[in-house]
Structures are given as C-alpha cells and as structure tokens.
Image: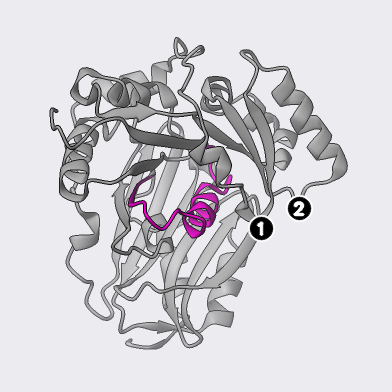
C-alpha cells in the first residue's frame, strides 16, 4: 500500500475484555479531539449485529466503521486489510483508533498493522488495555488466556469502572498490573471512561516486547475457511414490522444471539428493561432500541446496566453474549421481547 499522501498515520489500539468500557472511553476521547484532526474509528464486535458503531455519532471529522460478526484478529482477519486500505484511501484520516472485540487477541491484529502492506503508512502507538478492577474478583477471568494476553501485550493500562470499584479492588488491580512484565508505561484511572487526551496525543511507539504470545484457539480460527461477512453490515435490508431478524454465532467458548427490528416497532421501556434485567447476570447485553421514551442505548456488563439516549434511528438491535451454558432460550427470550412492543405489531 503505497501513497505519498498516506504516511506515518498514528494508530491507537484499545483492547480489553468484554464489558470493560472500550466504546465509552473512545467516545470520551473523541469529545476531546483536536479540531484540526480527522479521526477514523474501526470498531470490531464479536456479536453478529453492529451495536457499538451505533454508540458513536459520525461526522465529517470522525469516520466510524463497524466490523461485526466475529473476532478481528482471527475470524475477520481476511477482511481487515481490505477494510483498512479502503478506510485510509477514502477518508485519509490524521489518526486511526481501533477497538477490537472483547475476546480479540492482540497478536493477529498487530501482525496486520505492522505487516508489509502498511509499512511506512501506519505508525502503531502505545497499545492500551482497559481493566475493570472488579473483573479480577472472577477466577474465570484471571485464568482466561485472552484476558491475560491482552494485559501482557499492552504498553499501558486504563483502569475503568473505578467509580464502582472498592478501595480494595483498586489496590488489587494496581498490584496485579505492577507484577506484569514488561512494566507498563503508565497506569491511569478512567472513571466513566474519562482519560486525558494527552495520553493519546503524546503516546510513543508500541514496544512489542510481549508479542511472542500467541493463542492456539485464535490461531485455529484464523487458519479455518473464511466466513462470509458483509463489509458493511449497516447496509443490510431493514427488517419488516413484525418480522424480527435473528442471528447467532459461536467461537472461543462464547455464544452470541442477536435480533434486529423494524424502526416502526416501538417498545415499552419499563417492560423491556424488566425482561432484560431478568436475564442471567453474567450475560453481556447491548442494544439500541426504539422505545416510547425515545431511542435508547442499553448496555449491561457484569450485571450492571445503563441507559442513555441514542441518535441512532435505522433499526432496533439487541445482542447477547455469554458462555454457552449461560445463553437463554432464543425462542423464549424473543417471545418475551416481542410482548414488550406497543407499536408496529
């Protein structure tokens, strides 16, 4: 990829396990963006429908591209390079920000970014991993290969959800990070996703000291026959009223279940949140939904849910992600959701 107008574009990679707050942190950074810069944001979601992209408000100087349907470092590796080439040539950003799936392993993505195709075009800066201190209370997380590799391969650590963490959890998190090798360049709190823009703008080159780590599970998916993925999942046909579209997928020990509804269908927000709150607490739940109270973003991780107004208007979307044994019945869940509609039935 050679272009005299594309050279040394800073690339910022924000990794972190499911529900660590990557999208929120990137949105807060965009709010601090230097006005003279144009940013491109590439968002990868393990789920089958793009929801995180709906959480960003695109503009002339912030271009947002979503790649749902699997892990960017393995399942979608074959489309990553083409997507980046198109994004860079079409929009010519001053800075590129990449948010991989919470289950994404950094090694495969780093291979692409530092490969021959982008030599002298992309300049990989400090890789930042987001860590929710409460996550360390879960033995399953502390023993998870991808969770540990994300921490090990990062240059710096942003502690998220600190407004919900106890003093003991914060102490344990900092102690855990201090025991990592190589030592991190910085560790910073990011309550509500707030991180100083200076940490982005003044970041140095990625050290790559721990890049020898690899994942057999991700490697197997990368070598498997490529799956068919729409390069623009947001251009899919709009669902018809009363005919929600359902998708499911599985990889790396996790299952996904998702639906899309026509924008003409309106949900009762109170009834809807009651249905979602009854889902297993360890379920990762994300949605952008048309309700009688307006369009709402629903976001739940580690059993804590939040609602926020959304500028999205194209369709309603809901995504569930969990280990296989925790995934509820698709038929029963959809029936409960359908019963929450007040218009467009």
Q: Does the magenta stretch include residue 281?
A: no
The numbered mark, 1 or 2, whose residue comes first in the sequence reads 2
Q: Who is closer to the viewer here, 36 or 167?
A: 36
**Residue 1 vertical position relative to residue 341 in the rendered view, above or below:** above
Res 178 → quadrant: top right
**Residue 28 vertical position relative to residue 146 in the rendered view, above or below:** below
Which residue is painted at 38% across and 35% down in the image? 11
Res 189 → quadrant: top right
Which residue is painted at 57% across and 73% down in the image? 273
| C-alpha gap between disc 1 and disc 2 | 10 Å
Q: In this view, which residue lies farthest toward the right?
A: 168
Left or right? Give the position of 319 relative to 166. Answer: left
Left or right? Give the position of 193 relative to 117. Answer: right
Residue at image mark 2: 164
Q: Badge 2: few (under 14), some or many (20 or more) residues near its Cα, within 10 Å?
A: some
Residue at image mark 1: 304
Q: Is residue 27 magenta?
A: yes
Which residue is painted at 45% across and 73% down in the image? 310
Q: Looking at the figure, which quarter contains the C terminus?
A: bottom left
The secondary element bearing badge 2 is classed as: loop
Q: Looking at the figure, which quarter contains the N terminus?
A: top left
Q: Give the range drawn in magenta.
A: 16-44
Res 64 → quadrant: bottom left
Identify the mark at residue 78; answer none if there is no mark. none
């Amino acid at each position: 990829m050679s272009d005299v107008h594309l050279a040394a574009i800073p690339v910022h990679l924000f990794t972190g396990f499911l529900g660590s707050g990557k999208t929120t942190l990137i949105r807060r950074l965009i709010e601090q963006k230097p006005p003279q810069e144009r940013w491109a944001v590439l968002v990868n979601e393990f789920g089958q429908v793009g929801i995180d992209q709906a959480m960003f408000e695109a503009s002339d100087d912030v271009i947002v591209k979503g790649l749902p349907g699997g892990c960017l470092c393995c399942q979608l590796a074959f489309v990553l390079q083409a997507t980046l080439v198109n994004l860079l040539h079409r929009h010519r950003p001053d800075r590129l920000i990449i948010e991989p799936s919470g289950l994404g392993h950094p090694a495969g993505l780093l291979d692409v970014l530092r490969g021959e195709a982008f030599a002298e075009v992309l300049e990989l800066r400090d890789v930042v991993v987001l860590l929710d201190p409460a996550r360390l209370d879960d033995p399953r997380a502390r023993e998870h290969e991808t969770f540990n590799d994300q921490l090990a391969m990062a240059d710096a650590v942003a502690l998220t959800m600190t407004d919900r963490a106890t003093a003991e959890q914060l102490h344990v998190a900092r102690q855990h990070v201090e025991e990592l090798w190589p030592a991190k360049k910085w560790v910073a709190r990011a309550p509500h996703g707030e991180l100083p823009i200076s940490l982005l703008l003044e970041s140095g080159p990625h050290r790559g000291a721990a890049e020898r780590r690899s994942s057999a599970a991700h490697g197997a998916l990368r070598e498997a026959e490529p799956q068919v993925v729409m390069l623009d999942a947001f251009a899919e046909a709009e669902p018809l009223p009363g005919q929600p579209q359902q998708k499911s997928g599985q990889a790396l020990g996790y299952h996904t279940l998702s639906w899309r509804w026509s924008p003409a269908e309106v949900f009762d927000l109170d009834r809807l949140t009651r249905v979602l709150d009854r889902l297993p607490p360890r379920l990762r739940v994300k949605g952008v939904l048309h309700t009688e109270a307006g369009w709402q973003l629903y976001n739940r991780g580690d059993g804590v849910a939040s609602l926020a107004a959304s500028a999205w208007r194209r369709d309603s979307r809901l995504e569930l992600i969990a280990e296989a044994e925790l995934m509820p019945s698709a038929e029963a869940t959809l029936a409960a959701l359908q019963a929450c509609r007040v218009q467009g039935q």
